[in-house]
Amino acid sequence: MGSVNLDNTGSGSGVVLSSDGTSLLLDGTAIGGGGGGAALYAANEDNPTSQPSATGSNDIAIGDGAVASGSNSISIGASSSATGSASVALGIEADATNTNSLSMGYQAVASGVKAQAIGNFTDATATNSVALGNGSQATAANATAIGGASAGGSYSTAIGRNSMNEGAVATTNIAAMALNGYASGAASFAASIDNNTSSYGATNTNTIAIGNTSKATGSSAAALGTANQSTADLSVCLGHNNESTSAGAFSIGRYNWTPQSDAIGMGMYSKA
């Protein structure tokens, strides 16, 4: 290859610039990192007209059509969008649209302030909401949905799916919690119901329903076991297929029916 001789106008000797076909050489020594270590990234664009866009201060956008427009935001993945201040969107078509929001996964959406949506098709749409796991939906302030569940009440928590692959549901009221069940009453709790519709579970204030297809629909009622129904205020069922249908009624055992207020039905096939 050719070379260029540079004479020194001062007191030292001249230098020679040349190339070996790969590197720029100064007096025969490679300079400027030419021919150095392996590249730290690679790109293979199939649509070079859809470039990433980073328009906010200190933004980073990587991927076909990625957009980062909120200050200090990061968007990585094709068609991802980080438009909230200090937001982060990671994944194809992931969206983080509010302040300090985080979305990770295919079509994950975090649109509430400080919301977090992690997993494919997750949605965290309210302030401080958290959706973790594919298909989880947290749509009320401070709600948490995990494992494909749906939390739609403020401070509510819903975790897991039932045997029919339906997500647990905690909805409507404050601080409801559902674990493989349906909870819609304020401060209600439903677990192991294996049916996530409003036909079962804990649907009134301060209710508890635990066990396959049990339901507690009266205020402060409790149904524990399988197929129990506590439908009146302060009513309780323990066991299997019991019914407490008047205020303060208590049924324990199997197949008992307690239709009288403050009555107790015990054993099997009793009526009180």
Image (cartoon, rainbow, N blue to C red):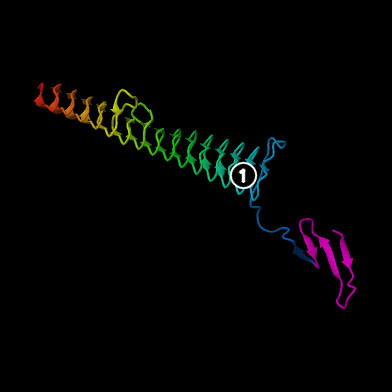
Report whether 43 appears left or right of 161: right
Q: Which quadrant of the view contains residue 164?
A: top left
Q: Position of residue 73 (x, y in %)?
A: 60, 46
* Residue sitting at x 71%, y 37%: 48
Local secondary structure at mark 1 = loop
Q: Position of residue 271 (x, y in %)?
A: 10, 21
Q: Which quadrant of the view contains residue 216?
A: top left
Q: Position of residue 169 (x, y in %)?
A: 37, 31
Q: Give the quadrant of the N terminus.
A: bottom right
Amino acid found under the numbered disc labelled 1: Gly
Q: Which residues are magenta?
A: 1-27
Q: Nearer the viewer, residue 35 or 241?
A: 241
Q: Nearer the viewer, residue 263 or 238?
A: 263
Q: Position of residue 220 (x, y in %)?
A: 24, 32
Say whether residue 9 is magenta. Answer: yes
Q: Residues within 10 Å of mark 1 (few under 14, many from 20)?
A: many
Say whether residue 131 is magenta. Answer: no
Q: Nearer the viewer, residue 57 or 119?
A: 57
Report whether 183 appears left or right of 90: left
Q: Which quadrant of the view contains residue 91?
A: top right
Q: Which residue is mark 1?
A: 70
Q: Give the quadrant of the C terminus.
A: top left
How many marks are shown on the rendered structure?
1
